[in-house]
Amino acid sequence: MNKIPKKNKKKLSPIDRVKDIFAYFSTYLLLLILTVAILYPVMWILGSAFNEGTSLASASAIPKNPTLNNFVKLFKETDYEKWYLNTLTIAIANMVVSVLIVGTMGYVFARLKFAGKRVGLLVILILQMFPSFMGMIAIYVLFLNFGLLNQPLALVIIYSAGQIPYNTWLIKGYLKNVPISLDEAAQIDGATKLQTYTKVILPVMFPILTFVAVTQFMAPWFDYILPSFLITSTEKKTLAVGLYELINGQANTNFTMFAAGSVLVAVPVAILYLFLQKYLIEGLSAGANKG
Amino acid sequence: MSNKKKKKWWQKLIGEKMTNSGWLSFFIFGLGQLKNKQKGKALILFAFQFAYVFIEVITSKLVKGVIPNQPEYWGYGFFRKGIHGFITLGETTGGRFRDNSPVMMIEGIMVFVLILIYIVIWKMNIKDANDTNLSIQRTGIVQSSKAFFAERFETGFAYIVSTPALLLLLFVSIVPILFAFLIAFTNYDAYHNPPSDLIDWVGFANFFKVIKLAGWRTTFAGVASWTVIWAILSTMTTFFGGLLLAVVINSKRVVLKKMWRTIMILPWAIPGMISLLVFRNFFNQTYGPLNAMLGMDIPWLNDPIMVKVTLVIINFWLGVPYFMMLMTGILTSFDKTLYEAATVDGANSRQTFWSITFPILSAQVFPLLIMSFAGNFNNFGIVFFLTGGGPRNLAYEYAGHSDILITWIYNMTKDFKMYNMASVMSIIIFLIIGGISTWNFLRSDAFKEDN
């Protein structure tokens, strides 16, 4: 409290003093209200996972008799394990393929001069404006014809293709801050473009490629639309579809099981995000600046 | 350059000066290269052309006359059949010779794309034969194919390494999007169910439906206006919420800044889909804990007006952390001398905020706001997972009260098979979002630099 007069170097009038107290009070009140608004739903779902009953009505933030039954049931009665494994496979494959493709594309569009570059940039810019499922009917027919339907790994083709435009722009923007003299020095030393890329640019791109890797790894975990169209059998489902179908319209029989399933996937993700927050936010704002 | 006006159309297409080698390659890929004594290159180019011809012939031979009484066009080769199918979208229905219109359309698009690639290679093949021939005439030196490829790998590096990505984009993004666009000009809907029915081109009829038919017009007007209101409200609330929170936590009154920030970004760290499915139950009117806690019976997600308010509230919960983090980053990178100067001039904290902090912030954040607007405009997840479009609206065609354009399209596609109308709406969304994004992009530094 006594910091304020020192700073203003003036003695506060009684009215200002009341105003100041009010400002303190409202600041902390706001923070407290928001904290409750954020933490209550989180506590509720955590608590629900350990509740005894199965229904929504019986779920509470602080379970009376905490139990692990919901987790046991989740593994026994559903294919949760398989969903988790399917999604993990897709996620890893998508991460690897995406980083390989996007790193190269980013380098090409950021550093090299070639005819058709502006057209290419505009085309990928336009492509990223389309909602992802707009071409779904066509993709369905194409997959049907090539026998790729109901094959989880085939989803990787679409995930990795779909993110090329956005991430190319992202990396292009990132490389703008890397001095071009690096490339030029390498080329004076007789390096080919491939060597310049692998030996000079790739190490520099490491932070942004990590961002791409994390986001691409995360994408399949919570994408519902694509697998709901292209995967038909239960044991090949991904986690997002499995969880959604567990709860959709059946909140009264499966709610606590759904809570358990959500907690198992959301907790590791949230920890990862909090851990990498600085990194991820940098990537996000770089993507928004596009340049 | 001086005889620019006299240039014939074919000169524009294949190059100004045609040599003998050029003419040879004009007819058969690689023949000109062979004359230029570049065997490796010639072989590769010829193999390319041969592959196309081979596919056309073999696909025709395999099916032609295999089944008695089959329609004549069933015996066409892959490319001819593709084009024929694209134009007619199938002629026979029922029985063993039935045509599958959507498949024919996609095959047609792919054939067009493949032909386009063929033409590009053909052009390059002629140009290369000409250039090599002219260089041999000038210098008398024949470059070996091997040396050529080594050089090409360096000069054409950009094209070579991006080919896989471009092919992927072509067949997974561009072809499906072209297909989706073209569907808007057909009668592919719930009443035409391929392969038992055929689909036909109908021109702009579906676009007129949106204007003329009362049901579609009401739905479109209702859904589109809610989408715009939603996009503006959700962007503005999260932006100002995030700004307020960043400023508040940044202020000198607050202790334990790090703890508060960690709590506030928690909603961002939790996967959106999980949060939304949880909220759907949290806000449940009858069994949800919120009404139980408040001891009230508020129809959060069941009332046409209330559902919209709830959506904005939940979006606030989900979206504020992102803007808060962005603003915190920008605020901490601020030039402190600006504030000092303002304080010296006698500005109070409110004045400093509105005349210094806010203008600088908005300039930096404006592109982000536009992106956020576009993102919210197409925020499929929040509506789909929270309300599924509900509550029902009987005056609407295939949409509920809380549906935005994108979820309406999804409903039409997935549940009601109104593919053509969904496609019309996609085109409209594309024009709106594409227009805004392009405008945002054109005024950005990135574009100006690449000019």
Image (tube, grey):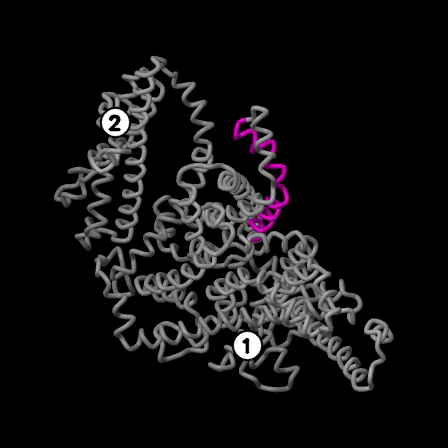
Chain ID, mark 1? B
**In the image, what residue occupies the spot 23% across and 49% down?**
B86
Q: Residue furthest front?
A: B345
Q: Position of residue A73 (x, y in %)?
A: 62, 62
Identify the residue position indicated by label 2 in the image: B17
Report the number of discs. 2
Q: Residues within 10 Å of mark 2 (few under 14, many from 20)?
A: few
Most prominent secondary structure in the magenta stretch? helix
Q: Position of residue B10 (x, y in %)?
A: 21, 34
Q: Position of residue B403 (x, y in %)?
A: 44, 72
B43 over B230 or under it: above or below? above
B140 over B196 or under it: above or below? above
Asked if the stretch drawn in magenta spans residue A200, the answer is yes
The reply, left or right, for residue A245 in relation to residue B26 is right
Image quadrant assignment for residue A119? top left
Labels 1 & 2 near each other (Cβ < 8 A): no
Which stretch is magenta?
A: A192-219
**In the image, what residue occupies the spot 51% across and 61% down?**
B371
Question: Tag 1: residue type?
Answer: Thr
Q: Which of the two marks, 1 or 2, is nearer to us in this view?
A: 2
Image quadrant assignment for residue A185? top right
